[in-house]
Every structure is written in structure tokens, then in C-alpha cells.
Image (cartoon, helix red, strand yellow):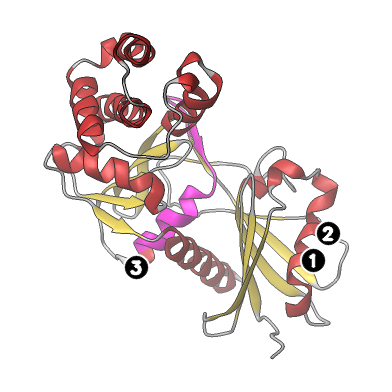
Amino acid sequence: MSVKAKWIAVDWGTSSLRAWAMDAEGHDLSTASSDQGMGTLAPSEFEAALCALVEPWLSAGPTDVIACGMVGARQGWIEAPYHVTPCKPQSKLTKAPTTDPRLNVRIIAGVSQTQPADVMRGEETQIAGFQKLNPNWDGVICLPGTHTKWVQMSAGEIVSFQTFMTGEMFDLLSTASVLRHSVNSNGWDQEAFDQAVDEAISRPEAIAARLFGLRAGSLLNDLPATTAKSRLSGLLIGAELAAAKPYWLGQSLAMIGPKSMGDGYAAALAAQHVPVTRTDTAQMTLAGLKSAYATWKETL
């Protein structure tokens, strides 16, 4: 059955593109995805990449498209200027240049923080989706990922946030450092992870030494690769939790992120007796895109 979209919701990251065909009542009729992320495209190539994915959903007249993510970065389709905290998670839309008369594309702005300097793109839409589904919620939202974010919310606004490169550090250390020889495993040692989290929270200043200890342990004591990998993850997440303690200690905490990334954070926080409300990333993203579209239409 052919689908014609009333409007199209788009989540466009660095490595992937995902779109939903939406009807007038806000129901998703179909979904499609590709590997045409921002990182593979020049600014002049975004329109063609989008058309290739959503062509079957387009009508003769212009179809509204609401997009979030790195598509609005400086290296993206067009830069969608940041909105500065404190602010609502979705406050601005930027029109993207198009030549196809069937497209009317708007990109959601990211959020920036002046001091200390920080930025987000895409997460603001997930946060808006969480708020839409959880009205009047105040507290902290953790968004685990390559660059994990801790976001303080109050009265519907992003008050402050902090980004940690923990996921990227794990990837670099496990694939491009001397530790790559010691952590090559697909297994998992929960006890080793938990112990490493405790060590890092207790003494985050010692993390660099403990990291090299993984290599030394494998050379001298036959430390299993599974244990070393689990300890590496625990040390990095524990150091992050130590630094982010003002965000999670005594706060209502929600988590938006893929299960593969969120499980480690949830386990580490549970060990600190911090309850976490887990949510689905795709659901929050789509809810946020729907919220942005509804707000935009109200202003026309």
C-alpha cells in the first residue's frame, strides 16, 4: 500500500538518517532509514539524500519536513543557530534551502551553554519528547552515548547541562591505545565492572594509573580480556559519575538512550542507590519531533 505523508519527521545524525511518514493526527504511517548521515555528505548533497529516502511519501505539493540532529550542524545542510540556556528544549526552527518544490524543510536548533561552554544537537528533541510524555516533570535527564549528557530541567526549561566524552574515550582506548591488546573480548564481567565503578568514584584522580594497570595485569597476571574490558568501562563511567555527582545525587533521574549504552550507567547508578526511569530513544525522538511540528503549525 502506498503512503502519502501529511508531514515527515526526520532524525539525522552523524552516521545515519531515519524518517517517519506522519498523518494529520500525528500517527506514523511508515518509517525508513539509511546510512546517509551528516558525516558522509556535503551541504549540497542533503536534499538528494532525503529525497532518495522519502520519495514514495511525497505529493505534488510541498510536504513539511521537521528534522533534528547533526543535519543542523555547521557542517550539515545549513547551520541552525543554537538557542542559549536557560531555554525550552525546542525554541527555534531554521528553514533549509531546497530546490525540489515538494519539500519544505525546517531544522530544529540545538542548545548551547555559555559557561561552562557546552552544546547539544538532537538531544534537545529527545528531551522535548520526554517532557511531552511526562508533563510537569522536573529533575535530571541522562542521555548516554558517545558524548553522554547530563541535563538539569526545571519548569520546562533546560537550566544547565554537561557533556562527557566517556563513550568516545572507551572506543579510542579499546581500539587505538595500548589497551587494545588487553580488552579484545565480547564477554562481560559484571563484578569487575561494579568494582571498577566503585574505585573510580572513590578515587577519580587515580584513573590514569588504573587504566594502565589493565595492560600490566594482562601481561603479568593473565588478566582475562573480558575482565579488563569490563573494568575499562567501569573506570570510565565511574569517573564520569564522580564528576557528575551534583547532577544525580538526590535528584529525580530519567535516562534516554539505547539499551546497550544505558545498561552500564543504570547498573552504576543502582549501586549508588539512585533509581532511574529508563525510556526508549526512538519513542522520545519521535515525540519530540511531533511536538516541534505542532508548535510550529500553531505559530503560522
Say what secondary structure mark 1 lies in.
helix
Say what secondary structure mark 3 lies in.
helix
In the shown orientation, is residue 277 left or right of residue 232?
A: left
Range shown magenta: 113-131
Looking at the image, which residue is at 69% across and 37% down? 74
Q: Residues within 10 Å of mark 3 (few under 14, many from 20)?
A: some
In the shown orientation, is residue 163 left or right of residue 141?
A: right
Looking at the image, which residue is at 67% across and 80% down? 5
Tell us which disc is closer to us: 2 or 3.
2
Do residues under tags 2 and 3 come within 8 Å of each other at their CB atoms? no
Do residues under tags 1 and 2 come within 8 Å of each other at their CB atoms? yes
Circle on res. 133: 3
Q: Quadrant of residue 66?
A: bottom right
Vertical placement of residue 207 versus 279, above or below: above
Circle on res. 267: none
Q: Position of residue 257 (x, y in %)?
A: 40, 51
Circle on res. 48: 2
